[in-house]
Image (tube, grey):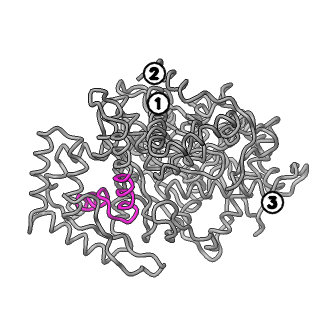
């Protein structure tokens, strides 16, 4: 059976300089599918799957018919899988958006000493948004180029142009991604500001003039005062958007009966973005607490009603300094969110505010409160949405962990891909916790192609399983050199599959296309797609993503299945931020235990690399050991990221990492041997 040797076909570009997404050969995909699944199934299951796949791929059979139809589809469309993928990944998913679908970026902790400080931060951020949108409207954003594997290739930029011009409209069976069309004379642009569960229209262009930062602050001060008026407070309608998509579609239908509600919904759906002015989330401001507040708002009594989850970009500014952005994921991928937020935070550093004061007298028209006419049925729907959200808040088991013993520089010195290495560490952690391999999802960008989104890197390879077994099963008596060979083999397999995915030759999108083409042709569902193996292959118990940043912030999201983990990681030079999530209601998962196993595995992998390198180059290792002894307490601690309390100096507190910049704060670090002993005492 061929192992990861698929070649993407040559193709002409599609008018924008980018080629079309290739369509892999049917036999290659079926062979790869069997290879990916064999070690995840029982022998009996695999024999059945092997037979089913062979039938599907027979000459003149169903598979060849569907493949030929996909070839025709590819000829006609800019991207043959885009619509299938968008519907399957997002729009047909009926789960609630918070936690289940919408990722968040958590900014550095801010030190707001007075309420006006958070409004200044918001005004400064909105100014950055308007600058960025000017670039987007002029199509003046520089083209992205691929980094990492196959670096230097230009990437499709279409996702950027949906950041501030799209909206996810709920539907009873499938949502719609609505993209606004620009016109020669667009009506004045506006932002929706959420404050104390009330929604306000903030016009950012008045009389063809864009508001400056002082004007924005003046308007935000007015909004804060209006929100304090208890006599005019309306129910937290935003809670309805946190419900399941079918339930929210029904609630929206009920709201639309009243013209007042239709007008308010129209203003929200056409706005650029939301700015959510949150109250304090509580006394504890750890990274984990702030991550949870971004993901779900902390509950109905806190800030969960201060959202509108259908908008792609919701900027959250908390009175307690917890800030970030909530992203509706269907219009764009995480890297686009990162690029946008990094631009905004760097803008705020590059154009520091001069303690802008709100104008005491302003001729600007007052912001408008959105009005709602709420019938008893709407109140009932709100109560139901609030109850379900509270259950979701209680259910989320989140842990944001900074692994500070080493980062990607150590991994690079081993001549290994940092991403592949970390994926192996995640496989090792899961196996230590659960003693079995599971289907794993790692997103891989296909933006090298026109309208490209992502495909899946199947990280649970046979090579990964061989490695984690050798690391965890003492009965195998595997030598250190053999373990090292297994590690390098697993890294190589992971890297090869990554290249397949980013060049459009992985299996998940292809299998999806074959399945959806059968539905489109109103054929009976092929047996292969009802086979237990196919269900197992799409139950991504481990859902992972690398989201590296150049600014001190991190990304997180929830699991995609009830008994799974979400694992987002941000590798830096000498540390790695992991955001791991699971659900308390699952008796099979425990985030804290997973993080312990992850840390232990990373330390074990470093120890293995050091031992094997020591054997191969003893003189070099002795020299390095001597150097480390002389500089103990200095070399690693220079670059360890500061704790949130250490970088609260002036607004905004944002740390941008330049390529040659080092951090000079000294910190106490536990030795790796001590950490290993602690993890042994605490768990597996």
Image coordinates of residue 21 in percent, x first then y, are 36, 70
Which of the labelled discs sits on residue 212, or is there none? 3
Q: Is residue 313 above or below residue 396?
A: below
Q: Is residue 86 above or below residue 76?
A: above
Mark 1 to mark 2 CA distance (whole Å):
8 Å
Q: Is residue 286 above or below residue 166?
A: above
Pointer 1: what residue?
600
Q: Looking at the image, is mark 2 or mark 3 nearer the viewer?
A: 2
* Magenta segment includes 506: yes
Image coordinates of residue 535 in percent, x first then y, are 24, 44
Extent of the magenta region: 492-516
Q: Residue at x 79, y 47 (%)?
A: 120
Q: Are marks 1 and 2 in contact (CB under 8 Å)?
A: yes
In the rendered image, the residue lying farthest to the front is 619
Q: Nearer the viewer, residue 660 or 414?
A: 414
Which of the labelled discs sits on residue 680, or is there none? 2
Local crowd size for mark 2, using a 10 Å CA cut-off: few (<14), some (14–19), many (≥20): few
| Left or right side of 202 for 680 | left
Q: Secondary structure at mark 3?
A: loop
Image coordinates of residue 463 in percent, x first then y, are 30, 46
* Magenta segment includes 512: yes
Instruction: Determine the main secondary structure of the stretch shown in magenta.
Output: helix
Q: Are marks 3 and 1 in contact (CB under 8 Å)?
A: no
In the rendered image, the residue lying farthest to the right is 360
The mark nearer the N terminus, 2 or 3, is 3
Q: Secondary structure at mark 2?
A: helix
């Amino acid at each position: 059976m061929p192992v990861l040797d698929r070649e993407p076909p040559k193709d002409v570009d599609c008018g924008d300089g980018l080629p079309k997404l290739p369509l892999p050969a049917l036999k290659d995909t079926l062979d790869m599918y069997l290879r990916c699944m064999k070690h995840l199934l029982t022998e009996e299951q695999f024999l059945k799957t092997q037979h089913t796949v062979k039938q599907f791929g027979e000459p003149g059979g169903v598979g060849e018919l569907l493949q030929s139809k996909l070839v025709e589809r590819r000829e006609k469309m800019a991207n043959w899988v885009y619509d299938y993928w968008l519907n399957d990944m997002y729009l047909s998913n009926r789960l609630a958006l918070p936690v289940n679908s919408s990722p968040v970026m958590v900014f550095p902790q801010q030190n707001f000493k007075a309420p006006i400080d958070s409004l200044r931060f918001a005004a400064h951020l909105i100014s950055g948004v308007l600058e960025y949108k000017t670039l987007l409207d002029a199509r003046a954003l520089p083209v992205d180029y691929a980094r990492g594997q196959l670096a230097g290739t230009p990437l499709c930029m279409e996702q950027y142009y949906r950041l501030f011009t799209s909206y996810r409209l709920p539907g009873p069976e499938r949502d719609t991604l609505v993209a606004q069309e620009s016109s020669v004379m667009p009506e004045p642009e506006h932002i929706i500001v959420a404050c104390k569960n009330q929604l306000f229209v903030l016009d950012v262009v008045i009389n063809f003039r864009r508001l400056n930062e002082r004007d924005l602050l003046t308007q935000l001060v007015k909004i804060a005062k209006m929100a304090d008026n208890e006599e005019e407070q309306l129910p937290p309608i935003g809670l309805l958007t946190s419900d399941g998509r079918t339930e929210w579609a029904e609630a929206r239908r009920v709201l639309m009966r009243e013209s007042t509600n239709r007008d308010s919904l129209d203003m929200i759906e056409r706005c650029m973005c939301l700015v959510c002015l949150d109250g304090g989330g509580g006394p504890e401001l750890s990274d984990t607490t702030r991550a949870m507040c971004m993901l779900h708002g902390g509950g109905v009594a806190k800030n969960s009603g201060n959202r509108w989850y259908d908008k792609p970009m919701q900027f959250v500014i908390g009175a307690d300094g917890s800030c970030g952005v909530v992203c509706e994921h269907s219009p764009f991928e995480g890297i686009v969110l990162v690029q946008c937020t990094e631009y905004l935070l760097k803008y705020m550093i590059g154009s520091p505010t001069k303690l802008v004061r709100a104008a005491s007298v302003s001729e600007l028209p007052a912001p408008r409160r959105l009005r709602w006419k709420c019938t008893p049925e709407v109140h009932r729907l709100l109560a139901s949405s609030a109850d379900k959200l509270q259950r979701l808040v209680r259910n989320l088991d989140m842990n944001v962990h900074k692994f500070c013993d080493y980062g990607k520089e150590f991994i690079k010195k081993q001549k290994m891909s940092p991403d592949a290495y970390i994926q192996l560490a995640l496989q090792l952690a899961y196996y230590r916790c659960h003693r079995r391999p599971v289907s794993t999802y790692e997103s891989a960008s296909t933006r090298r192609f026109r309208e490209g989104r992502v495909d899946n890197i199947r990280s649970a390879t046979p090579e990964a399983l061989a490695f984690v077994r050798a690391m965890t099963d003492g009965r195998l008596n595997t030598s250190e050199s053999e373990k090292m060979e297994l590690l390098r083999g697993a890294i190589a397999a992971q890297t090869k599959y990554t290249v397949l995915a980013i060049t459009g030759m992985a299996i998940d999108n292809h299998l999806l296309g074959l399945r959806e083409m059968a539905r489109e042709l109103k054929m009976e569902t092929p047996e292969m797609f009802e086979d237990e193996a196919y269900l197992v292959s799409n139950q991504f118990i481990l859902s992972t993503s690398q989201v590296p940043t150049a600014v001190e912030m991190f990304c997180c999201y929830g699991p995609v299945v009830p008994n799974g983990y979400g694992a987002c990681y941000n590798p830096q030079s000498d540390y790695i931020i992991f955001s791991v999530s699971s659900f308390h209601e699952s008796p099979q998962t425990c985030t804290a235990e997973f993080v312990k196993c992850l840390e232990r595995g990373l330390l074990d992998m470093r120890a293995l690399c050091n031992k094997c390198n020591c054997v191969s180059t003893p003189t070099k290792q002795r020299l390095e050991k001597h150097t480390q002894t002389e500089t103990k307490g200095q070399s690693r601690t220079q670059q360890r990221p500061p704790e949130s309390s250490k970088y609260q100096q002036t607004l905004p507190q944002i740390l941008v990492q330049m390529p040659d910049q080092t951090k000079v704060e000294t910190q106490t670090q536990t030795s790796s041997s001590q950490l290993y002993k602690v993890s042994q005492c605490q768990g597996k």
